[in-house]
Image (spheres, grey):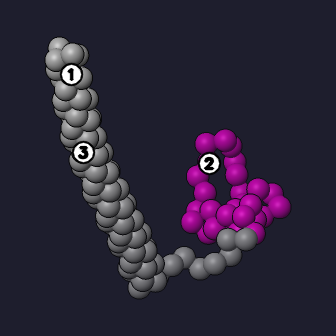
Amino acid sequence: MKELNIEVSNHMSTITENAIRQLDERLNPSSKEEPKKPEQQKQTQKSGQQANQKQNHQKILITNQTTRKTMIIRRTIKSNQTKIRNNKKESTKIETTRNHKINSLNKKNQRKHLLK
């Protein structure tokens, strides 16, 4: 405090706005910028709001893309499940037809044996 020519009589002394500014400049040399004016603050707020809107919009787009991909995957799965069901039905039909043919041949063979 002595280096900055700020008088302090005891540990409970108060300091002026000017002394606070001097201390800030001394302790934080990189913050020599002027305090922002209300217009600058409004512009900063607007740009921050615009950035937030863009981020929200991007999140919505990503969500929509994910939803679309999910829907496509679900349709593909459903289509594949339908194909599997149809293949099982076809397989069952073929198996049934084959069994009928075998049974028919067995009956014919049994008749032949009986006739002999």
Question: Is 38 displayed left or right of 79 in the figure?
Answer: right
In the depicted structure, whether residue 78 falls above or below residue 52: above
Picture quadrant of residue 63: bottom left
20 falls in the magenta region: yes
Q: Residue at x 39, y 74 (%)?
A: 54
Q: Residue at x 17, y 14 (%)?
A: 114
Question: Is 8 displayed left or right of 110 in the figure?
Answer: right
Q: Quadrant of the N terminus?
A: bottom right
Mark pair 3, 1: CA separation = 33 Å
112 falls in the magenta region: no
Mark pair 2, 3: CA separation = 95 Å
Question: Is 33 displayed left or right of 78 in the figure?
Answer: right
Q: Nearer the viewer, residue 89 or 47?
A: 89
Q: Horizontal and vertical percent for residue 15?
A: 61, 57
Instruction: Judge depth for marks 1 and 2 and give the one in front.
Output: 1
Q: Nearer the viewer, residue 78 or 86?
A: 86
* Residue that carries the numbered disc 2 in the rendered image: 13
Q: Residue at x 70, y 52 (%)?
A: 8
**Magenta stretch, overall SS:** loop
Mark pair 1, 2: CA separation = 126 Å
* Residue that carries the numbered disc 1 in the rendered image: 112
Q: Horizontal and vertical percent for residue 99?
A: 24, 30
| Magenta-colored span | 1-29
